[in-house]
Amino acid sequence: MLLWQEGWVWIVAGVVLAALEMLIPGFVFLGFAIGAVLVGVLVWTGLLGHALPLTLLIFAAISLVSWLVLRRAMGVRRGQTKHWDHDINDN
């Protein structure tokens, strides 16, 4: 059996990505971590994992949806981006 067909590999990858999220915050790695863990559960239950392209597509879709949900739930912090009203060279 190939390594990507093992459910525990996806779950361990999700845990590693979640740990990486603690070092580099921004909900990017957390979306991938949620996607990897859910794909790991799907592979472990036997619902997924026979075709690599389909598995990667499901992983990408779950990761994107989880990132969008996290972005919606946590929102963008105020003051995260700076908007300039005038140019420093304007007199």
Image (cartoon, helix red, strand yellow):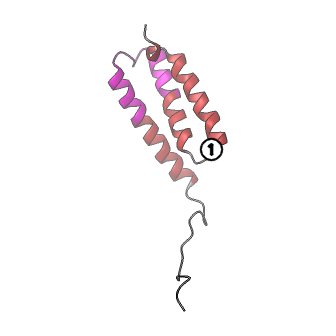
Q: Which residue is mark 1?
A: 24
Q: Residue at x 54, y 76 (%)?
A: 84
Q: Main secondary structure of the magenta part?
A: helix
Q: Which residues are magenta?
A: 37-60
| Image coordinates for residue 66, horizontal then vertical, percent | 48, 41
Q: Residue at x 53, y 46 (%)?
A: 70
* Rendered view: 19 above or below 5: below
Q: Is residue 10 magenta?
A: no
Which quadrant: the C terminus?
bottom right
Residue 20 lies left or right of residue 4; in this view the side is right
Residue at image x 53%, y 85%? Answer: 89
Kindly give the residue lying farthest to the bottom in the view shown. 91
Query: In the orientation shown, which residue stands out farthest toward the top?
Result: 1
Residue at image position (52%, 88%) is 90
**Quadrant of the rendered image containing residue 11:** top right
Crowd band around label 1 with a 10 angstrom C-alpha radius: few (<14), some (14–19), many (20+): few
